[in-house]
Image (cartoon, rainbow, N blue to C red):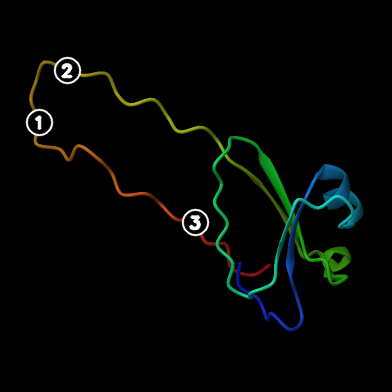
Amino acid sequence: FRYQKNQYNVFLVNQTGYDNCTTEGAVGNWTSGKDFILFNKTMRYYFICGNGQCMNGMKVSVFVHPLPSPPPSSSEHHSTPKSAAPMVLEYLGL
């Protein structure tokens, strides 16, 4: 998330907090203005701005899907890399 750190912030909340724009019971809080958040579980994440801007639409819900299973091995040999680089998702405009 990128934002002006003196004006905004980011809270990780549950669905009730998201629906009602409340930070009560928040499980995360970021204030740097350039926040990178690791999505390490398959679930829905709810983020809001806790400085009153949530009511103006400054909120986002992200659903993280599980990684797909690797393709089955074949008897053919291909010259493909054994590993892939991780992908980073950066959401701009909270």
Give residue 67's position: percent from left, percent from top.
45, 33
Foreground of the two, 82 or 92: 82
Q: How far apart are marks 1 and 3 (CA)?
A: 29 Å
Q: Tell me the tag on residue 78.
A: 1
As shown in the figure, which amino acid type bears the numbered disc 1?
A: His
**In the rendered image, which residue does mark 3 sit on?**
89
Q: Is mark 2 on a helix, strand or loop?
A: loop
Q: Which corner quadrant of the image does residue 14 belong to?
A: top right
Residue found at x 83% / y 64%: 54
Give residue 42's position: percent from left, percent from top.
59, 35
Q: How crowded is mark 3: few (under 14 residues within 10 Å), some or many (20 or more)?
A: few
As shown in the figure, which amino acid type bears the numbered disc 2?
A: Ser
Q: What element carries label 1?
A: loop
Q: Is residue 46 toward the left or the right of residue 16 in the image? A: left
Are discs 1 and 2 less than 8 Å apart at CB?
Answer: yes
Q: Is mark 3 on a helix, strand or loop?
A: loop
Query: Would you place residue 89 above or below residue 68 in this image?
Result: below
Residue found at x 21% / y 19%: 73
Q: How far apart are marks 2 and 3 (CA)?
A: 31 Å
As shown in the figure, which amino acid type bears the numbered disc 3?
A: Leu
Residue found at x 54% / y 51%: 38
